[in-house]
Amino acid sequence: MASKKSTKQKELSDTALSLIAARFRALSEPVRLRLLNTLMQGEHSVTQLVEASGTGQANVSKHLAVLRDAGMVAMRREGLMTMCSIADPVITQLCEIMCARLKAEHAELGKALP
């Protein structure tokens, strides 16, 4: 009788699951996704992110704080400007995986992504 290889992953602790959930909550807002999408093109100032997002400066700052607290965005001062960049390259990979999956689903349905 052949033995089965275990494909079961190690169970995550409640603390780890809470941390993962917090990261996904940070990604659950379209404005934050728009900010990340812009930052994937390179470092931008908060002013540039306000222009790119089409929302107000206070709103962008609030969303950037959520992304920074989740470890996804890094911020640094350059004179009077605050510059932002992707802090964790895994975020870019995650977004690429999701975008590829959505494109594949739409292709299967014969629709183009808007």
Image (cartoon, rainbow, N blue to C red):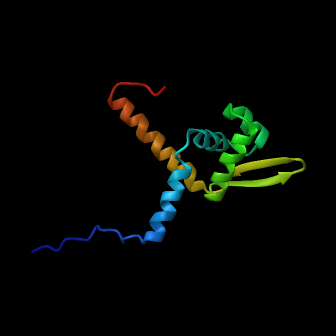
**Side (left or right) of 47 relative to 102:** right
The image position of residue 36, as x and y in percent, is 62, 44
Q: Tell which of 65 and 104 is nearer to you.
A: 65
Give above or below for 112 relative to 18. above
Q: Residue furthest right?
A: 79
Please state, as top left, top right, bottom left or bottom right, where the N terminus lies in the image. bottom left
Give above or below for 71 relative to 64. below
Name the residue at 72% across, 35% down: 56
Give above or below for 94 relative to 101. below
**Side (left or right) of 35 relative to 1:** right
Name the residue at 52% across, 46% down: 28
The image position of residue 59, as x and y in percent, is 69, 41
**Side (left or right) of 47 relative to 94:** right
Q: How many marks?
A: 0
Image quadrant assignment for residue 9: bottom left
Q: Tell which of 51 and 44 is nearer to you.
A: 51
The image position of residue 73, as x and y in percent, is 67, 53
Image quadrant assignment for residue 12: bottom left
The image position of residue 106, as x and y in percent, is 38, 31
Name the residue at 65% across, 39% down: 38
Name the residue at 56% across, 39% down: 30
